[in-house]
Image (tube, rainbow, N blue to C red):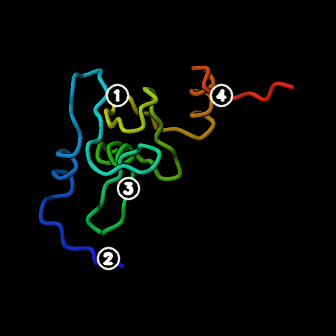
Amino acid sequence: MEKCTKIHKKESERFLEKFDQRGYNECWPWVASKNNGGYGTFRLWNCKTDMAHRYMKRILGYDIDEKIVAHICDNPSCVNPLHLFVGTQKDNIYDADSKGRMIRNRH
């Protein structure tokens, strides 16, 4: 098992270096580690990993425990807080359905 080394920079400072902050309404793509689904991953001070879009909402003061953080822009690597919403899985499904992204079983 890989040993986690102490991180010398403040966690939030490291986070801010790992995405491309573009225009106000543009996607801000995560440029560091990503999982197989294209979602950004971020190593925390305690050596645990968090999803970058979830961490963005957390550092902005949102209570995201027991909730999901979904992308309005449908870009999994985006961390622009204007493109993220905190809600339930039902909210996420409604968002996907309203955009025509739900696969329906047609019998």
* For residue 48, side relative to residue 87 (left or right): left
Other residues around mark 4 within 10 Å, as few (<14) / some (14–19) / many (≥20): few
Identity of the amino acid at label 2?
Glu
Q: Could you tell which of marks 4 and 3 lies nearer the N-terminus?
A: 3
If the image is split into quadrants, where does the C terminus sit? top right
Helix, strand or loop at label 3? It is strand
Report which residue position mark 4 lands on. 102
If the image is split into quadrants, where does the N terminus sit? bottom left
Q: Are marks 1 and 2 in contact (CB under 8 Å)?
A: no
Q: How many labels were placed on the picture? A: 4
Q: Label 1, label 2: how many angstroms apart (C-alpha)?
A: 36 Å
Task: Tell which tag, 4 or 3, sits nearer the viewer.
Answer: 4
Q: Are marks 2 and 3 in contact (CB under 8 Å)?
A: no
- Residue furthest front as drawn: 36
Report which residue position mark 3 lands on. 50
Q: Which mark is residue 82?
A: 1
Report which residue position mark 2 lands on. 2
